[in-house]
Amino acid sequence: MPIRLVEKRSLGTFVVVWAVTVLAARCVAQDALIQEGHLIDPGSNTIAQHQSILVHAGKIAAVGENLQAPLGVQVIDLSGAWVLPGLGDAHQHITLDFPPAPAKGSVWEGLRLNQSTAERTVRGIRNARALLEAGFTMIRDVGNAAEYADTEVRRAIERGWFPGPTMLNAGKIITPFGGQDPGAAPERGAWWHDEYIDVDSTEQVRAAVRRDIYYGALVIKLAADSNTYHFSEEQIRAAVDEAHRAGLTVAVHVYGGEAARNAILGGVDSVEHGYELSDELLDLMKQKGTYLVATEMSAQNAMMLFGDIGMDVKAFHEHSLQRLQRAYRHGVKMAFGTDASLELADSTRPNQILEQAEIWQEAGLSPQFILKCMTVNVADLMGLGKSRGAIRAGLAADIIATTENPLGNITALRKVNFVMKDGKVIRDSRSTVPR
Ligand SMILES: [Zn+2]
């Protein structure tokens, strides 16, 4: 028996050593020469053929024809693939997994009651990895993370403990009294403080921004119109002033009307959702350079998120398409963001994100425009324009590849089979995917 025990332990030790070695080899940044077939630059709408990318110390050292691999540098052959910069989602909630709502009503309150910040953190780590493996190398997490679970997820990724996208996080969402939970019984008290900070004066707005920054927020998120009252332009301006002074941008959940006007005039960096923006407000956004993060989801997914709220599925979808077309026609800056957060047996979070890209395509927006919104524009909105969002010398080596041309059809993004993040190969499933 003792001999068998020793044998078993040896085998176990061997397996552990093998696993650690293999995983380390996959996850450590290694200099590489990537030889590619078609290099897509969504920013300039160009495709270059037969280029090579030299990756050194996690960054792109050079891009060009006939680059030679220095001695000892790994050669990665992507010559049959379509190569492009890593993707971004500017409206994520990675610590939040929504089970489908029952026929009537929402699971939102129960979910918050039953899940600890620790659980939300672990969910965030799981979702961050899944997003990265699908090719999403940048995300902006816009709050709803219990007691700052998003900060812990971001720090764990930055420390290299777990693989994940480059991330900005918002911490608690700042709202007028009541969070995004209208109609709570008075005896329940301000129970929404688990996810929200409520503020009702300009000074309170400033204090809330400082509090979020203190607990690790890298972007400030306001929700302006979740109740019938909303932030004034002065209150918005105070949040923007306080955030910008600390080098942070401001994202505002708002659908339309006066609340949206106050947000835009108050100088926010992005309007989130904006489902009811009038032509006049879209013009104002264009004038002010405000980003729209449109979060267009399918009617089916909206019902699973919010419950059956008597929605006319066909009208909802038509409205989504027309709103995207109007924003595009008005020339509003758009960064791709989704709100995708359903926990479904038959559709992963990356799938839900890509479904939304397909809605953009159905609205008539070109794959090139969509890719630009998913790469360059997300990087710009996140303040990462000088370091990510394109494949160019000096930028981080965030590189993905697909088997089909996403400029021909955006659904090709479902066939990402190679992901490199900061020079580390995160996923390489090329041999299992037929060319
Ligand atoms: Zn959201």
Image (cartoon, rainbow, N blue to C red):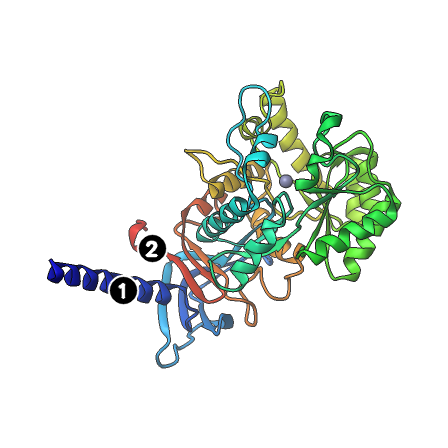
Residue 29 in percent (x, y) is at: 44, 69
Residue at image position (36%, 81%) is 71
Which residue is most to the front? 2
Q: Is residue 423 left or right of residue 112?
A: left
Can you see residue 339?
yes
- Numbered circle sitting on residue 430: 2
Residue 2 sits above or below residue 55 on the image: above
Check disc 1: other Cα within 10 Å, few if <14, some if 14-19, many if 20+. few
Residue at image position (59%, 40%) is 339
Looking at the rendered structure, the kind of residue marked 1 is: Trp
What kind of element bears circle 1?
helix
Q: Is residue 79 left or right of residue 277?
A: left
Give the Cα separation between the discs numbered 2 and 1: 22 Å
Q: Dividing the picture into quarters, in which one does residue 249 lie? A: bottom right
Looking at the rendered structure, the kind of residue marked 2 is: Arg
Q: Dividing the picture into quarters, in which one does residue 292 lie? A: top right
Q: Is mark 1 within 8 Å of ligand 1?
A: no
What kind of element bears circle 2?
helix
Residue 418 in percent (x, y) is at: 40, 56
Can you see residue 42?
no
Residue 311 in percent (x, y) is at: 62, 20
Check disc 2: other Cα within 10 Å, few if <14, some if 14-19, many if 20+. some
To which residue does mark 1 refer? 18
| Earlier residue among tags 2 and 1 | 1
Q: Dividing the picture into quarters, in which one does residue 2 lie? A: bottom left
Which residue is most to the bottom? 71
> Which one is nearer the viewer's eye here, 328 or 275?
275
> Which one is nearer the viewer's eye here, 257 or 280?
257
Residue at image position (63%, 47%) is 147
- The N terminus lies in quadrant: bottom left
